[in-house]
Image: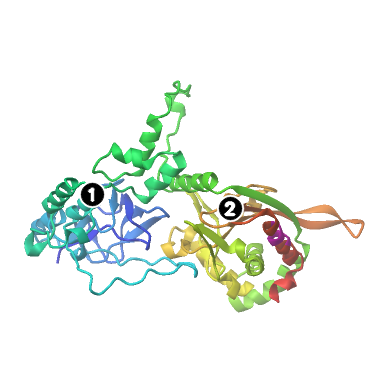
Amino acid sequence: MAQIFTMPQLGSTMEEGTILKWHKQEGDTVKSGEILLEIETDKASMEVESPVDGVLRKVLAKENDLLPIRQPIAILGSAEESIDALLIEALGGVPAEETLALAPISEATPPAVQASPPASSTSVKVFLSPRASRLAEEHGVSHAELSGRGTGPQGRVIERDVLAYAEARKAQPTEKASPRATPLAARVADDLGVDIGELMLGLPGSRVRRDDVVRYAESRQPVPAPPVTPAQEDVTIQPFAGMRRRIADNVAKSRFTAPHVTLTIEVDMTATAEFRQRILPEVEKVYGVRVSFTDIIIKAVARALDEHPMMNSALVGEEIRIYAHKNIGVAVALEVGLVVPVLKRAEEKSIGAIAQEAKPLIDRVRGGKFTPDDLAGGTFTITNLGTFGIDNFDPIIVPPQAAILGVCRIVDKPVVVNKAIVIRSMMNLCLSFDHRIVDGAPAARFLQRLKELLENPLLILI
């Protein structure tokens, strides 16, 4: 039986998504669980599977279209059945609740974040057609305001009902419709110093999107002189979009919003190197994986965060949230950009268990098979550039977290120990922290404790 396929909600905070690529074309046969298309959210690009067996009868949304969740994007069905009625419904005749969409994937939320209370069982359910729902959003009209105003089949609210109500409300001096801005547009407006309210005045009845904000910001800038560029045949054009654009938005927001301060400390890793060699055979026998230095550092960080809880916090709105569990993200470099999978509750796991969980998690990310849950819920991040021979760098905080730890290379060098020059395995740690949340002295004490744990790794086990 033919059904409408809508923009899925790939995470509890997702409001809209961009169709990056259709993996199937109209008329193609699809199997349940087969990749149908690729969608970009504000967090990641995800492959979306077909929920049913059948044929992709009609594509309703093009690649690069930005659409709200539950907006019809395709019709799936058998090759021989008529889809005329469904096509009419998809373009403006049925409530979104009756269309086919993937079940929402819940994102792991750090413990301090409280879930919203369930909606009252006495609330009135209002049915809107997809076009009516979007039109209501553009005019700032809530579904509750449209209760009892539907003139469509079985009392459904359709486009003309929304327009009629919006016009009637304009005539009332006490009511003022306000167009909405997407969350990404609001963030970009904040980063670029754009007055979102002023921009909305120029876009009456429209939903402000990121591109609107960027165009408005560019229009206020002086026109630069044409740049001197190489010959066209010497230039390779790469679109500034997808994951690269998302990373750019995130790091720009972090750098220009959070006042970064970076502290660097040198750590003698000789004892940790010896400790790793001693536990390698036993961990491999019990857990089936080899322990890396990163695994040991994750455990040491979790232990240090236990003693310095403000480093395991985030600034969300007007409140600082201090998280009970240590959900540690580990930055992984891919060809297309940086992805940060999260190892949940690291404080509860042994070094062997961390190694056993971290390896398949990172392998999934490198293979492009990760889920929204793999990236969700981080409270602290580690980024390691040691394999590239880096001795010092200034990592950018993953918002809204309080801090990020940069790990540099381990190198043998002469140092003074007990007034004698000896060769030791030395490494730099670079801690960037948000000075709005943490001051320099507490951050330095956290870094000092981490140094102590790594120079005496048996303390990690206590």
Question: Which one is nearer the viewer's eye here, 403 or 242?
Answer: 403
Task: Quadrant for residue 328, please give it.
Answer: bottom right
Q: Amino acid at mark 2?
A: Arg
Which disc number belongs to residue 436? 2
- Which segment is the magenta one? 444-448
Provide the major secondary structure of the magenta segment: helix
Judged left or right of residue 184, residue 170 is left
Which disc number belongs to residue 49? none
Distance between the alpha carbons at the discs numbered 2 and 1: 39 Å
Q: Looking at the image, which residue sits at the far right? A: 419
The local secondary structure at tag 2 comes to loop
Residue 447 colored in magenta in the image: yes
Residue count near mark 2 (Cα–Cα under 10 Å), binned few <14, some 14–19, many ≥20: few
Q: Residue 69 in the image: x percent, y percent?
A: 28, 57
Judged left or right of residue 430, residue 320 is left
Q: Residue 386 in the image: x percent, y percent?
A: 66, 53
Q: Name the residue: 40% across, 69% down.
A: 115
Can the viewer see residue 58? no
Q: Residue 452 in the image: x percent, y percent?
A: 75, 64
Frontmost of labels 2 and 1 is: 1
Is mark 2 in CB contact (under 8 Å) with mark 1? no
Q: Earlier in the sequence, mark 2 or mark 1?
A: 1
Q: Name the residue: 69% across, 51% down.
A: 263
Q: Amino acid at mark 1?
A: Thr
Judged left or right of residue 231, residue 36 is left
Q: Residue 91 in the image: x percent, y percent?
A: 15, 53
Q: Quadrant of the N terminus?
A: bottom left
282 vs 224: above or below: below
Judged left or right of residue 116, residue 110 is right
Q: Which residue is mark 1?
A: 174
Question: Which one is nearer the viewer's eye here, 431 or 175?
Answer: 175
